[in-house]
Image (cartoon, rainbow, N blue to C red):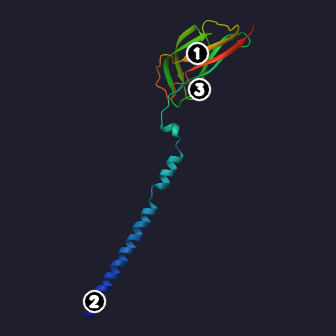
């Protein structure tokens, strides 16, 4: 019986050693193939803007050309998605309607577009000018509050 007991203990000890060795090897393999560094590398190469599509056109500027007093309005694609749409712009001077226009707007992210307003409207003296782009809400934007601007514009010819 003493021999049989020693063999059982020896066998149990070898089995335990085999189990521990196998567990360490498996753990080593898990550590070697861990996806964490690969995920970190993918995430560090991404920007939040690339993940979320943001459409946003903003009224960027209203001014009078100081050489001829022509009224100008500027827009900017403030989103991260190309804009390609027909948008309505309205312009008021001192609260009185001046012009409306429908424009085929094609702007890459970050791009600007400036244009003269109306058919040669010239600012005389100091005027309060309000302009709005996407006046009919064609675009579903991330920020609708930057589509209009009111600015005091002055020019003397």
- Whether residues under marks 2 and 3 lie with C-beta atoms below 8 angstroms apart, the answer is no
> On the image, numbered disc 2 is attached to which residue?
5
As drawn, 21 above or below 86: below
Coordinates of residue 97 in the picture (x, y in percent): 57, 8
Which one is closest to the eye, mark 3 or mark 1?
1
Q: Measure how far apart labels 1 and 2 are at the Cα level.
A: 96 Å
Q: Measure how far apart labels 3 and 1 are at the Cα level.
A: 19 Å
Side of 78 relative to 20 (left or right): right
Q: Which residue is situated farthest in the bottom direction here?
A: 2
Which residue is depicted at the point 46% across and 62% down?
A: 32
Within the image, what quadrant is residue 100 found in?
Answer: top right
SS state under label 3: loop
Which one is closest to the eye, mark 1 or mark 2?
1
SS state under label 2: helix
SS state under label 1: strand
Q: Measure how far apart labels 2 and 3 are at the Cα level.
A: 85 Å
Within the image, what quadrant is residue 92 found in?
Answer: top right
Q: Which residue is situated farthest in the front direction here?
A: 95
Which badge, 3 or 1, is on the more N-terminal residue?
Answer: 3
> On the image, numbered disc 3 is attached to which residue?
111
Coordinates of residue 77 in the picture (x, y in percent): 56, 26
> On the image, numbered disc 1 is attached to which residue?
131
């Amino acid at each position: 019986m003493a021999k049989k007991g020693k063999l059982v203990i020896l066998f149990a000890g070898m089995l335990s050693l085999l189990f521990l060795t196998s567990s360490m090897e498996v753990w080593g393999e898990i550590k070697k193939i861990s996806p964490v560094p690969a995920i970190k590398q993918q995430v560090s190469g991404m920007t939040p803007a690339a993940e979320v599509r943001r459409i946003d056109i903003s009224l960027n500027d209203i001014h009078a050309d100081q050489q001829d007093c022509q009224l100008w309005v500027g827009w900017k694609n403030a989103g991260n998605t190309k804009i390609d749409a027909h948008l309505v712009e309205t312009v008021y001077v001192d609260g009185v309607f001046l012009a409306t226009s429908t424009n085929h707007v094609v702007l890459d992210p970050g791009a600007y577009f400036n244009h003269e307003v109306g058919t040669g409207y010239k600012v005389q003296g100091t005027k309060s000018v309000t302009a709005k782009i996407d006046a009919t809400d064609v675009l579903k934007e991330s920020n609708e509050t930057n589509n209009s601007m009111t600015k005091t514009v002055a020019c003397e010819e």
